[in-house]
Image: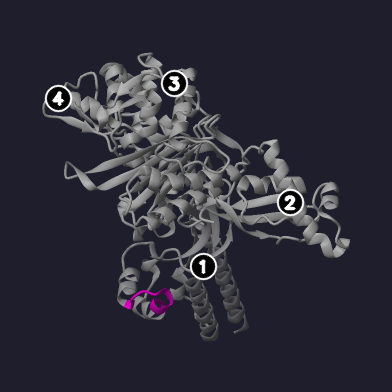
C-alpha cells in the first residue's frame, strides 16, 4: 500500500513538474514573441497611446508704431474643445454645461453627439466664462473622487489655450491695421497684407497623457518664439494719429458732414505719420461696422480733387518753361466761352491775373489757360509723373489707381479745360498728398511708406523698407517757385488766410469739388479740400484734409483749412518744431511786461521793491502770467525763465499750470492750453 502511495506521489510530482515546465515554455515562448518578434511594433503602439503628438497654434506677431507703442497684440485666451466619440451621455453633459458656456442645451448636445473626433465647443472664452468652466471642472472632479468613478464623460471636454488678436488702442488707426478672423488669419488692412509674416509658424509638440487621455507632461511653452510671427514696425506715430483723428472728428461734427479724411506725410522720406478717416472702425469688433467703414478710404476711394489740382497744372507749365510766375492772363471777368456751346465760370470775377494770382485766387479760367499753354500731351506726362492715374506702390491691399485721361488724345476743349481745375479726373487722397509732398521735396516724388521694418520675436531685423525716391518730376527751382506761389494762398487775399499755425508759414491750396451723383455734378454735395506744406520755406510736413459733404459751408478754405491748422500746429510740437523767436524790439517789450508781473507777484516778499530793480536781476523767479498771450510769446517767456513747456491747442493762452506767481523750481514743466477764439 505504501509502495503504491509513494509511486502515486512521484507521478503527481512528475505531472506537476511537466505542467510547470510546459507553462514555463509557453510563457517563455510568449515572452519571446512579445519582446523579440513583436517587440518593436508593440513599443510603437505604446508610444502612440502614451505620447501624443499635438499641434501648437502659431502666435501672431505685434504691430507697433514708430515709437514702439503696441497697436495690435496677441493675448492668451482659453477655448473649450471636446472629443464627441469618447462621450457616452451627451444629453446629461449638455444640460450641465450649457448654462456655463452660454449655449443652448440642444445646440450643445448636437455638437457633442456628432461623429467628429474633435470639435470646438466655444472659442475665445471671456474671463468670466473661463472662471465658470474651471469651477465646473472642480465640482465634477470632487464629485468623481467621492463616488470613486474611473471613466467620465467630463474628461473629454476641456480647455485649450489659443492666441486672440487684440487692439489696445481700439479704433485708433483701425482702418489701417485691419482685422483678423477667429483663427488668426488677416482679413483686411495691414493684417491681410502682411499675413504671411505676422501669422507665425505652427509646430508639433510631444505630450504624455494618462489612461484617461489627460495631459501630464508637455513640451509646449507659454509663448514659444519658434511659433511667434514677425512684428511690424510702422511709420505711423500714435500721437499724431490721435491728433489727426481728433481734429477730423471735431470738424465732421461741427459741419454735420458725411465723413472726412486726413493724411500727414514726411515729404523728405515718404513716411506716413498719420492716416485718419471718419467714421472710424474698432477692429476688436469689426463685424459691427459696415464694409464701407472698414475700408481704408484714403487709398481705396478716388475723388475729384477740385481746385487743389491747379497747383500741379501750374507746376507743369512753369517747369516746361511755357510760362513764368509773372506772366499775365486774362481771366475774362469770371466768364469764358470755350466753344460756341460751352463756357467756364469763376466763383468771383477776375480780370488780369499772374500765375501767382491764379493760384492765390483759385481762378478756374486762369488754370484752364495755363493748361492750354502747356499742351495736352505734355501736361499728361507731367501729371503721370506726379503719380496720378497709377498705383503708388504702397504696401497695402486694394489701392485704387484713380482715373487720368490721356489729355493728348482728348479732342474736346472743354474736357481739357475742366481737367485743369480737377473735374473729369479722380485721385485718391494718398496720390494727392504724395504729389503735394513732391513739391516740398524739391520736385522728387517719394514712394509712400507705411511700414518701416519687419523684426522677429527676438528683435532682429528681418526686412527694412528704406525711403525710395520714385522719380524727379520737376526741377528744384520750379518746386521753390511753387512753394512761394502757394504761400500766398494762406496770406491775406488768398483763399485760406486762416490755414497757417501761429508762427509758421504754409504753402497750400484749397479745393471745393462738386460730387458726382448719378453721373451728374451735384449742386449741394461737395468735398471741401485743403492741402498744404509747412513750414513753407523748408517743409517737414505735407498734410491733406478732405471733408465730405459739409453742411452750412462748402469751401475748403472755410471748412478744411482750420482742420489743417490744428493738425499742423500740434504735430509740429510733437516733432519738436517751434516758431522762430520774435525780433528784438518785440522781445524787449515782452520782457518788460514779464518783469513787471514778476515784481508785482514778489512784492510781499521783497518789501515793495521797484519793478526796475526786479527787472535788473535777470531771469524771473516766479511763474509769469501767460493768459491771453500767443504761442510765440509764451515760448519766449518760458524759455527766458528756463521752464520747459507742454502746449495744447492753438490761438491764445486760456489757462496754465502752475498758476501765475508760483515760485519756479528746477525741472518744472508748465502746461498751457490755447483756444482760437480767446
- Taking the spot 39% from the left edge, 18% from the top edge, the residue there is 318
Q: Which residue is mark 3?
A: 471
Residue tagged 1 = 211
Asked whether disc 1 touches disc 2, contact meaning CB atoms under 8 Å apart, the reply is no
Label whose residue precedes the other's in the sequence (4 or 3):
4
Q: Quadrant of residue 352?
A: top left
- Which residue is rendered at x = 81% and y = 49% of the image? 615
Q: Earlier in the sequence, mark 3 or mark 1?
A: 1
Closer to viewer: mark 3 or mark 2: 2
Q: For the magenta stretch, what is the residue range? A: 97-105
Q: Residue at the top extreme? A: 321
Few, some or many C-alpha atoms within 10 Å of disc 1 (few <14, some 14-19, many ≥20)? few
Side of 490 relative to 10 (left or right)? left
Which mark is first along the chain, 2 or 1?
A: 1
- Secondary structure of residue under mark 1: loop
Location of mark 4 (residue)? 339
Residue 603 at what x, y percent from top left? 83, 62
Q: Which is nearer the N-term, disc 4 or disc 2?
A: 4
Query: Which sits earlier in the primary sequence, circle 3 or circle 2?
Result: 3
Q: Nearer the viewer, mark 1 or mark 2?
A: 2
- In the rendered image, which residue does mark 2 sit on? 594
**Looking at the image, which is closer to me, 202 or 305?**
305
Is 98 magenta? The answer is yes
Amino acid at each position: 500500500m505504501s509502495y503504491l502511495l509513494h509511486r502515486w506521489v512521484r507521478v503527481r510530482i512528475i505531472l506537476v513538474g511537466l505542467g510547470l515546465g510546459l507553462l514555463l515554455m509557453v510563457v517563455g515562448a510568449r515572452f519571446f514573441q512579445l519582446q523579440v518578434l513583436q517587440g518593436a511594433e508593440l513599443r510603437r503602439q505604446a508610444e502612440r497611446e502614451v505620447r501624443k503628438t499635438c499641434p501648437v497654434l502659431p502666435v501672431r506677431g505685434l504691430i507697433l508704431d514708430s515709437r514702439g507703442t503696441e497697436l495690435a497684440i496677441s493675448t492668451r485666451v482659453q477655448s473649450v474643445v471636446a472629443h464627441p466619440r469618447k462621450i457616452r451621455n451627451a444629453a446629461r453633459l449638455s444640460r450641465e454645461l450649457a448654462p456655463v458656456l452660454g449655449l443652448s442645451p440642444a445646440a450643445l448636445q448636437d455638437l457633442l453627439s456628432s461623429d467628429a473626433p474633435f470639435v470646438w465647443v466655444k472659442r475665445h472664452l471671456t474671463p468670466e466664462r473661463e472662471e465658470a468652466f474651471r469651477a465646473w471642472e472642480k465640482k465634477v472632479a470632487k464629485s468623481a473622487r467621492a463616488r470613486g468613478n474611473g471613466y467620465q464623460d467630463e474628461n473629454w471636454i476641456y480647455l485649450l489655450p489659443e492666441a486672440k488678436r487684440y487692439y489696445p488702442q481700439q479704433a485708433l488707426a483701425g482702418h489701417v491695421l485691419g482685422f483678423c478672423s477667429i483663427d488668426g488669419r488677416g482679413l483686411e488692412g495691414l493684417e491681410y497684407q502682411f499675413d504671411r509674416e505676422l501669422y507665425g509658424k505652427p509646430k508639433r509638440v510631444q505630450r504624455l497623457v494618462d489612461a484617461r487621455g489627460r495631459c501630464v507632461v508637455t513640451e509646449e511653452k507659454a509663448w514659444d518664439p519658434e511659433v511667434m510671427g514677425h512684428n511690424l514696425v510702422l511709420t505711423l506715430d500714435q500721437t499724431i494719429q490721435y491728433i489727426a483723428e481728433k481734429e477730423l472728428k471735431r470738424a465732421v461734427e461741427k459741419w454735420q458732414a458725411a465723413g472726412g479724411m486726413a493724411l500727414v506725410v514726411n515729404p523728405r522720406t515718404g513716411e506716413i505719420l498719420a492716416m485718419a478717416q471718419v467714421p472710424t472702425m474698432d477692429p476688436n469688433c469689426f463685424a459691427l461696422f459696415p464694409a464701407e467703414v472698414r475700408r481704408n478710404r484714403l487709398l481705396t476711394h478716388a475723388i475729384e480733387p477740385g481746385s487743389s489740382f491747379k497747383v500741379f497744372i501750374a507746376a507743369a507749365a512753369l517747369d516746361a518753361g511755357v510760362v513764368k510766375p509773372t506772366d499775365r492772363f486774362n481771366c475774362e471777368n469770371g466768364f469764358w466761352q470755350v466753344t460756341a456751346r460751352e463756357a467756364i465760370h469763376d466763383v468771383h470775377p477776375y480780370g488780369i491775373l499772374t500765375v501767382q494770382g491764379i493760384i492765390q485766387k483759385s481762378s478756374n479760367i486762369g488754370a484752364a489757360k495755363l493748361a492750354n499753354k502747356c499742351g495736352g500731351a505734355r501736361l499728361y506726362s507731367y501729371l503721370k509723373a506726379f503719380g496720378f492715374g497709377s498705383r503708388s506702390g504702397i504696401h497695402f491691399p486694394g489701392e485704387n489707381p484713380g482715373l487720368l485721361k490721356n489729355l493728348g488724345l482728348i479732342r474736346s476743349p472743354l474736357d481739357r479745360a475742366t481737367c485743369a481745375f480737377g473735374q473729369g479726373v479722380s485721385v485718391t487722397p494718398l496720390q494727392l498728398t504724395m504729389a503735394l509732398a513732391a513739391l516740398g521735396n524739391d520736385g522728387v516724388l517719394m514712394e509712400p511708406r507705411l511700414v518701416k521694418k519687419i523684426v522677429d520675436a527676438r528683435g532682429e531685423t528681418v526686412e527694412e523698407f528704406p525711403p525710395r525716391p520714385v522719380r524727379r518730376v520737376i526741377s528744384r527751382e520750379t518746386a521753390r517757385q511753387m512753394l512761394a506761389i502757394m504761400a500766398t494762398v494762406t496770406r491775406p487775399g488768398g483763399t485760406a488766410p486762416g490755414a497757417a499755425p501761429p508762427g509758421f508759414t504754409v504753402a497750400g491750396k484749397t479745393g471745393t469739388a462738386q460730387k458726382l451723383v448719378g453721373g451728374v455734378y451735384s449742386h449741394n454735395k461737395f468735398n471741401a479740400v485743403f492741402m498744404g506744406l509747412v513750414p513753407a520755406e523748408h517743409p517737414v510736413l505735407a498734410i491733406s484734409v478732405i471733408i465730405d459733404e459739409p453742411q452750412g459751408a462748402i469751401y475748403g478754405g472755410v471748412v478744411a483749412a482750420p482742420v489743417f491748422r490744428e493738425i499742423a500746429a500740434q504735430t509740429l510740437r510733437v516733432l519738436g518744431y517751434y516758431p522762430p523767436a520774435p525780433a528784438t524790439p518785440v522781445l524787449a517789450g515782452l520782457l518788460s511786461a514779464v518783469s513787471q508781473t514778476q515784481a508785482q507777484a514778489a512784492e510781499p516778499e521783497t518789501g515793495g521793491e521797484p519793478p526796475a530793480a526786479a527787472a535788473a536781476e535777470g531771469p524771473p523767479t516766479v511763474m509769469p502770467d501767460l493768459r491771453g498771450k500767443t504761442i510765440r510769446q509764451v515760448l519766449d517767456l518760458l524759455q527766458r525763465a528756463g521752464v520747459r513747456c507742454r502746449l495744447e491747442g492753438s490761438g491764445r493762452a486760456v489757462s496754465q499750470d502752475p498758476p501765475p506767481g508760483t515760485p519756479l523750481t528746477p525741472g518744472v514743466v508748465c502746461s498751457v492750453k490755447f483756444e482760437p477764439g480767446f
